[in-house]
Image (tube, rainbow, N blue to C red):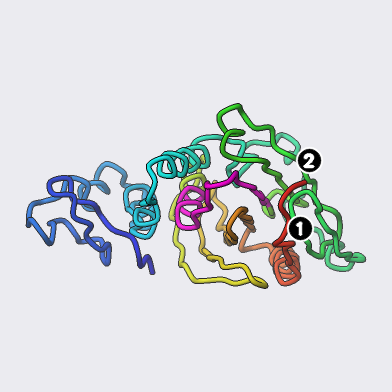
Amino acid sequence: MHSGYFLKCDHCGHLNPLKTEYITFCEKCHKKMINNFPDWNRNHPTKTFSDFIVEIGVFENSIASLQPTKKIATKKRIFVLFILATTGTLGVFLINADFSTLLMPAKTPKKLLNADWSRYVYSKSGWSMESPERFSETPLELSEQEAALVTEAVAINFQPSKNLKIEGVSVLYREKVFPNLPLILRNNLQNLIHQQGVTNLEFKESPAALQNLRGVLLEGTYHKQGEFMRFQMLVYSNRFRHWHLVISVDDDDPVGKAVAEKIINSLEIEENLKSI
C-alpha cells in the first residue's frame, strides 16, 4: 500500500523498505533504529502507521531524483522543494482556516448537480474542466527567492460547502529547474497531515496519465474533527510545469462526491502553456 517508502537507518544510512510497522532493526547493520514505528507510536498514540510513513518515511525515488549532474541544479531543485514544503504560496492546501466557510452548508446542495454545467477554461494556469460555476483563479505572489526559481504560480479554488473543497496550483519553473512528482506529493501529504484535527490518514498510490502528461494519483481517507473524509491528489508534469489538484469531500456527502467525480472526469490540461 505504501510501496516506495523507506526508513533510513540512523547508524549506517541504509534505506529499509517500510513493508510493515514492525521494522525496528536495520537489515544492513542489524542495529536498532531510533525512528522505528513502535517507539514513535508510543509518543504519538493517536497516529497511525500511514501517519508515520508520511512524516518519517523516505521516498527513494525522491532521493534518486535529486542527483543531477551539475551542483547548481542540485541546489535549485532542493530549494524549490523547500519552498513547496514550507510556504503557503505554492502549497496545495491554500486555505487552512477560512471564516467564509461558517456560512456554507455542511453538505453540498443538490441543486449543483441539477444546474447547467459549463466547461470553463483557466487560461492563466492551463486547467479546463466542467463545473456548475467557475472556479476562482488567482496568480500567487512570489517572494524574491521564489521568483528566482519559479516564473509564475496560479491557484484555482472551488468550495460550495464546508466539506467539499477542490484546490489546485499550476507552477511554471525557470530553466534548469524541474518538477519532481514524488516530492511534490510527499509535501502535499505533509500539508494535509499537519492540518489541525487530521488523524488516521490512509492512502494508496497509483500512476496516472492525462493526454501526454505523466502523473501520479494518491487517494485515501482521513478523519478531521469528527468527519470521515475522502481525498484525491492528482499531480501531472512536463519538462517545465507541474499541475496539482486536491479534492477532499465528506464521505457522508453523496452529492459532494458526485460533483467531485463529475469535475474530475472532465479534467483537461493545456500542457503546452508556458506563460500567462
203 magenta-colored: no
Q: Is residue 231 visible?
A: no
Q: Position of residue 239 (x, y in %)?
A: 58, 58
202 over 186 or under it: above or below: below
Whole-Å distance between the Cαs marked 2 and 1? 13 Å
Q: Position of residue 250 (x, y in %)?
A: 63, 58
Residue occupying image coordinates x 64% and y 47%:
172
Q: Nearer the viewer, residue 125 or 157?
A: 125
Q: State left or right for residue 239 relative to residue 262.
A: left
Kind of residue at badge 2: Leu
184 over 110 or under it: above or below: above
Q: State left or right for residue 50 relative to residue 34.
A: right
Q: Position of residue 3 (x, y in %)?
A: 35, 67
Q: Which element type, helix, strand or loop, lies under badge 2?
A: helix
- Mark 2 or 1, nearer chain start: 2
- Mark identifier at residue 108: 1
Q: Position of residue 268 (x, y in %)?
A: 74, 66
Q: Which residue is mark 2?
A: 103
Q: Is residue 67 visible?
A: yes
88 over 104 or under it: above or below: above
Q: State left or right for residue 177 relative to residue 271.
A: left
Residue occupying image coordinates x 27% and y 48%:
41
- Answer few, some or many: residues within 10 Å of disc 1's Cα (few below 14, many 20 plus, some between 14 and 19): many
178 magenta-colored: yes
Q: Residue furthest front?
A: 70
| Span shown in magenta | 167-189
